[in-house]
């Protein structure tokens, strides 16, 4: 047997990156924005590995994988089994499944970011929610973890029962082969790796220290109708408290509230009838029944009169201690703008929470 250089740095670096990034993303370490950044980094490596499966060195390309003979290979797990220089049938299928689920979990994550955070290339989904993205994201993440664990178990079994150097090759790149089967990158492959690394580095720096189209906050204003009435609403109602986004309550709640302004939570907030009608039209036209967000179905189902007193609010904020809402900085659950930087514009994304209050 001789030592052959089978796995180049172009193989090993993404492999090690997956080992580091996947647990960080899966256990949501570091907060919601850090989780999203890790997801983007994971996607960059997944895309690289897919492209490398077409343009890469020998044993890295998909057509160098072995998909036939899976049954025979598995039957020989604890006995004698065929020797493969690189990917055996089990690892070949595992790689394809991991890349597939990796793409699904990353794309669903970006779409979920647009739907819930109003950011990135899918920010339009904030007002056009799909509704089942969270389930797709979680199922694909769990499926990816399952395949990864199965893959790791296979490598460990190989190491213990067959004394192979597959695990060592992940770090060194070298495997024992009957004859020298070493690979070497072409100039094109080397240039591609360098270019992609630079591109990925710039992308990640812009995510952590700047803005990026993949996760950046969309500054587009909410799709309100009655713009003049909105100005009147901000002037009259916003003079005492934040002019809450009309889509955080349903039609019935706004009708009841606007019909009892003389006793508005213990205060007299009466308006000229003409102004009251105009503001009410604005609120009804842009309520949860007419402006769709991922929360709209739950708001319509519960139909709270005060969002900050709803079960939905409690569910969203369940990690935040009650003492936080009573602090001098916030004072009340109704003061959305004290935590959410874009509350006045109607956006309540977790990533836009003021840094000191990111939960």
Image (spheres, rainbow, N blue to C red):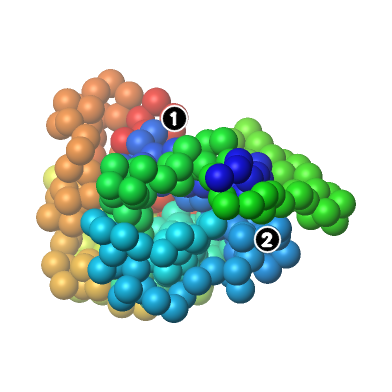
Q: Nearest the camera: 148 or 23?
A: 148
- Calculate the distance from the C-alpha at mark 1 to the C-alpha at mark 2: 47 Å
Measured as percent of width and height from the top left, residue 37 is found at 51, 44
Q: Going 39% across and 40% down the picture, which residue do you hit?
A: 24
Left or right of residue 176: residue 242: left
The answer, for residue 240, to whether it is visible in the render is no
Numbered mark located on residue 355 in the image? 1
The answer, for residue 71, to whether it is visible in the render is yes
> Which sits earlier in the primary sequence, circle 1 or circle 2?
2
Q: Which residue lies under the disc numbered 2?
A: 58
Q: Relative to 7, is 104 above or below?
A: below
Picture quarter with the N terminus: top right
Measured as percent of width and height from the top left, residue 263 is found at 16, 53
Measured as percent of width and height from the top left, residue 23 is found at 36, 42
Q: Going 16% across and 72% down the picture, which residue do you hit?
A: 301
SS for callout 1: helix
């Amino acid at each position: 047997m001789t030592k052959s250089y089978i796995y180049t740095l172009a193989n090993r670096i993404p492999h090690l990156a997956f080992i580091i990034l996947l647990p960080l993303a899966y256990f949501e370490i570091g907060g919601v924005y850090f989780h999203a950044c890790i997801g983007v980094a994971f996607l960059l490596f997944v895309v690289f590995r897919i492209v490398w499966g077409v343009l890469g060195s020998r044993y890295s390309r998909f057509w160098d994988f072995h998909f036939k003979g899976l049954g025979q290979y598995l039957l020989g797990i604890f006995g004698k089994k065929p020797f493969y220089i690189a990917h055996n049938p089990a690892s070949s299928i595992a790689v394809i499944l991991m890349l597939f689920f990796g793409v699904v979990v990353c794309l669903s994550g970006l779409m979920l970011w647009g739907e819930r955070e109003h950011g990135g290339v899918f920010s339009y989904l904030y007002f056009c929610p799909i509704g089942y993205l969270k389930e797709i994201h979680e199922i694909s993440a769990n499926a990816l973890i399952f395949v990864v664990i199965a893959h790791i178990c296979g490598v460990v079994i190989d190491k213990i029962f067959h004394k192979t150097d597959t695990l060592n090759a992940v770090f060194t790149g070298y495997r024992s082969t009957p004859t020298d089967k070493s690979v070497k990158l072409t100039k094109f492959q080397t240039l591609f790796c360098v270019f992609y690394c630079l591109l990925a580095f710039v992308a990640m720096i812009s995510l952590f220290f700047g803005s990026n189209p993949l996760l950046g906050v969309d500054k587009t204003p909410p799709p309100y109708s009655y713009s003049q009435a909105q100005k009147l609403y901000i002037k009259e109602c916003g003079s005492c408290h934040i002019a809450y986004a009309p889509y955080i309550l349903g039609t019935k709640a706004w009708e009841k509230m606007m019909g009892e302004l003389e006793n508005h939570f213990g205060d007299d907030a009466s308006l000229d009838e003409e102004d009251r009608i105009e503001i009410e039209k604005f609120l009804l036209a842009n309520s949860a029944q007419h402006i769709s967000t991922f929360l709209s179905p739950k708001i319509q189902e519960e139909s709270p009169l005060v969002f900050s007193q709803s079960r939905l609010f409690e569910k969203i904020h369940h990690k935040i201690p009650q003492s936080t809402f009573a602090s001098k900085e916030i004072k009340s659950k109704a003061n959305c703008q004290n935590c959410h930087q874009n509350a006045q514009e109607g956006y309540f994304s977790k990533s836009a929470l003021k840094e000191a209050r990111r939960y």
